[in-house]
Image (spheres, rainbow, N blue to C red):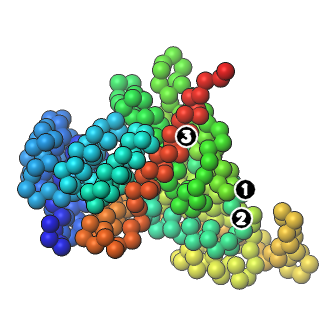
Amino acid sequence: MNNQRIGLGVIGCGGFGLFALQQFMQIPGVELVGMAGTHRPASIAAAARFGVENTDDLEEFLTLDGLDLVYIATPPFLHQAQAAAALEAGKHVIVEKPLAMTIDQADGMIALARRRDRLIVANLMQRYNPLVSAVRRLIESRLLGDVLRGSFENLASDENLPASHWFWDRSKSGGIFVEHGVHFFDLFEGWLGPGVVEAAQVGVRPGTGIEEHVHCTVRYGDVALVDFYHGFHQAGRMDRQELRLVFERGDVTLFDWVPTRARIHALLDERQTRQLCELFPGGRLDVAVSYGGGDRSCRARGKEIDAYQIMDLSFGDGAAKSPLYCRLLRAMMEDQAAWIRDRAHARVVTESNGRDSLAMACQADAMAHRKEG
């Protein structure tokens, strides 16, 4: 492989695979050389979109001339075997989340990639969201004090998930925590560091074996408790998500599963107000209450607070998430391609993200299914 060109191949190019591939192909030097999928209409359409052959033979696919990087967009139960085959063939690998079905599988994949000096990474593209980065800087600044609590409520649609879909088959998906929850375990770890699952539950749709919603509580550090809820039971037009962080002197709420807008409610002095606006440039500031004289003094958690105002800051345009999603996918591929070309490049997402988010998902899933007695 020369220093510029990266030959990309995709395994399992269905609807989302095509969506992601159209973004990956916009990165300079990344060229599609082949596709291994099925003869489903989505795969045939993807092959037609890019003018490449679509083979069902994985071994044949991995011997394609100029193939350097394999993108795997198949159901989770296929990830480990397909990634291992690609790594053994000397290819770099990007896998759709989750990285694997179990920690043992993930550790084996990472060890193989390191022996071969190859890439193995899960597509946890949330880390590239500028809004997510702004919240991380807010946490690190301690402008609002300690994070005390967090929550993520995912009210997702099952309109395109019939009972026969592999999503509901735990042997193929790993369950909701593993198939979907890893995005958000990784997101909160990026903000708060490693966490420990304290409690977890799973709920089954009455009259069926479908596990349609899950919940867990994770402790980060000594104080912060975060609740994660994922329910797949809404009509598509009612699909909605909300993420919230509660601090000592305010709270932050993000909207949509790929967050496009935020609202910050805070109790601040003059200097802190300026610093908050600098962290979220272009945000709209509304003042709810102003204080003066002796009214500025108040207390919380045993600490003195000098309060100039209670304010609300709105940030982000709330535009359709699809264009933002496209930008995040391009950022993901650009980051990983830079590492392929130069091992000194410091990536935003590494193999550890896929492994650590999977570990928490497996911990939550095991706790939710633990039998009493």
Q: Amino acid at mark 1?
A: Val
Relative vertical location of residue 363 with respect to residue 134 in this rendering, above or below: above
Foreground disc of the pair 1, 3? 3
- The residue tagged 3 is 363
**Label annotation for residue 146:** 2
Q: Amino acid at mark 3?
A: Gln
**Earlier along the polypeptide chain: callout 1 or callout 3?**
1
Name the secondary structure under disc 3: helix
**Label annotation for residue 223:** 1
Relative vertical location of residue 24 with respect to residue 82 in this rendering, above or below: below
Tell me where residue 10 appears, x and y as whole percent: 21, 49
Q: Nearer the viewer, residue 359 or 296?
A: 359
Name the secondary structure under disc 2: loop
Mark 1 crowdedness (10 Å alpha carbons): few <14, some 14-19, many ≥20:
few
In the displayed image of the protein, which residue is found farthest to the right?
Answer: 294
Q: Which residue corresponds to the image point at 18% horizontal and 64% vertical from the top-left?
A: 6
Structural distance between the alpha carbons of marks 1 and 3: 20 Å
Tell me where residue 117 appears, x and y as whole percent: 28, 61
Image quadrant holding the N terminus, namely: bottom left
Tell me where residue 126 appears, x and y as whole percent: 44, 58
Relative vertical location of residue 350 with respect to residue 180 in this rendering, above or below: below
**Earlier along the polypeptide chain: callout 2 or callout 1?**
2
Foreground disc of the pair 2, 1? 1
Name the secondary structure under disc 1: loop
Q: Are marks 2 and 1 in contact (CB under 8 Å)?
A: yes
**Label annotation for residue 313:** none
Q: Quadrant of residue 214?
A: top right
